[in-house]
Structure formats: structure tokens, C-alpha cells
Image: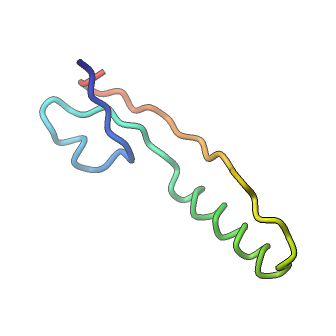
Amino acid sequence: MKLIGFDDTLLSRHTSPKLSSVAQDTLKLAETTCENLLALIQNPNLAAPKQQLVPVHLIERETT
């Protein structure tokens, strides 16, 4: 069995065995959200984006 966490929390680095995790760029996620919100505030008739992808990456530790 393999176990993988999400958000690469600090705890995942200190478990035994160390937990592999999917990490997301929270700064990029926040920036994208703010840009979309500001665009909607400046132009209320603008269609809100349905979906935007923010890259993630796998941090392999001892559980993969």
C-alpha cells in the first residue's frame, strides 16, 4: 500500500515513515484568485473563469 498526502504540510516531513505529498503553489493560487477577483470588480460584466489550472508536483518521500 502507498500513502500520499496533500498540501505538503510540515507534519508530512516528520512522520515515520516520511509521507510523500502533492504540493501546490499556494502563492500562485492566491495570485491567480486575486487577479480574477480584481478583473471581475473592474468589469462586472466579465464572465468569471470556469476553471484554471495551477501546477502541482509530487514530493516523493518514504511512502512511495
Q: Residue furthest top?
A: 1
Residue at figure coordinates x 58%, y 57% from the top left:
29
The scheme the figure's colours follow is: rainbow
State whether residue 33 is above or below residue 4.
below
Q: Nearer the viewer, residue 17 or 42?
A: 42
Residue located at (61% from left, 47% from top):
54
Residue drawn at point x = 35 percent, y = 45 percent: 8
Residue 21 location (% of width, % of height): 35, 36
Task: Please state if 10 lies on the left or on the right of 35 as rendered.
Answer: left
Counting from the top left corner in percent of width and height, residue 59 is at: 39, 32
User: In which image quadrant can residue 46 be found?
Assistant: bottom right
**Image coords of residue 57 (percent x, y):** 50, 35
**For this view, does 38 lie left or right of residue 33?**
right
User: Does 46 sit left or right of 34 as displayed?
Assistant: right
> Which quarter of the rendering shows the C terminus?
top left
Instruction: Name the residue located 64 percent from the left edge and 65 percent from the top edge.
Output: 33
Rendering coords of residue 15 (x, y %): 15, 39
